[in-house]
Amino acid sequence: MFEITVEESFAAGHALRGYRGKCENVHGHNYKVEVTLEGEQLDETGLLVDFVELKRWLRNVIERLDHRMLNEIPPFDRVNPTAENMARYFYEEISRALQESAGRDRVRVARVRIWETDTTTATYRP
Ligand SMILES: [Zn+2]
């Protein structure tokens, strides 16, 4: 089994609904996102997926969120913008991009990890 991983970071604001504590107030984080793809077969070049392509998919998702108030952006206008829900959102969006690529029959998203701070992460995997 092969895995490839890329990471990117972005900044965004949020406020958690229904949460009692500091995170119910509007505040921001410098998020880090790590996406890992997995598959057993490489393409004819010897790649699982080109890092350049995976980074482009990831940046396309980040572009919607960077320097924004997450609570105002779907699906986080309905779904609480916790690190857990953000990890699932990135998983779904990267999976969608992967489904439109040449590697869709060999490759899947293994997991997405979100760092909300240097010491706190949430991971989503199917
Ligand atoms: Zn927070």
Image (cartoon, rainbow, N blue to C red):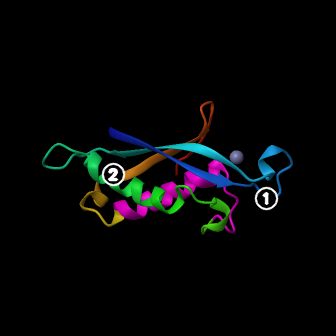
Q: How many marks?
A: 2
**Which amino acid does the dot numbered 2 rest on?**
Leu
Q: Residue at x 56, y 51 (%)?
A: 87
Q: Position of residue 6 (x, y in %)?
A: 38, 42
Return the residue at label 2: 54
Looking at the image, is mark 2 or mark 1 earlier in the sequence?
Answer: 1
Q: Residue at x 35, y 60 (%)?
A: 98
Q: How many residues crowd around disc 2 within 10 Å: few (fewer than 14), some, or many (20 or more)? A: many
Q: Position of residue 67 (x, y in %)?
A: 55, 55
Magenta span contains residue 77? yes
- In the drawing, does residue 18 fall left or right of residue 58? right
Q: Which mark is residue 34?
A: none
Magenta highlight range: 76-98
Return the residue at label 1: 17
Task: Classify residue 5 by image quadrant.
Answer: top left
Residue found at the very far top of the displayed protein: 119
Closer to the camera in the image, 1 or 48: 48
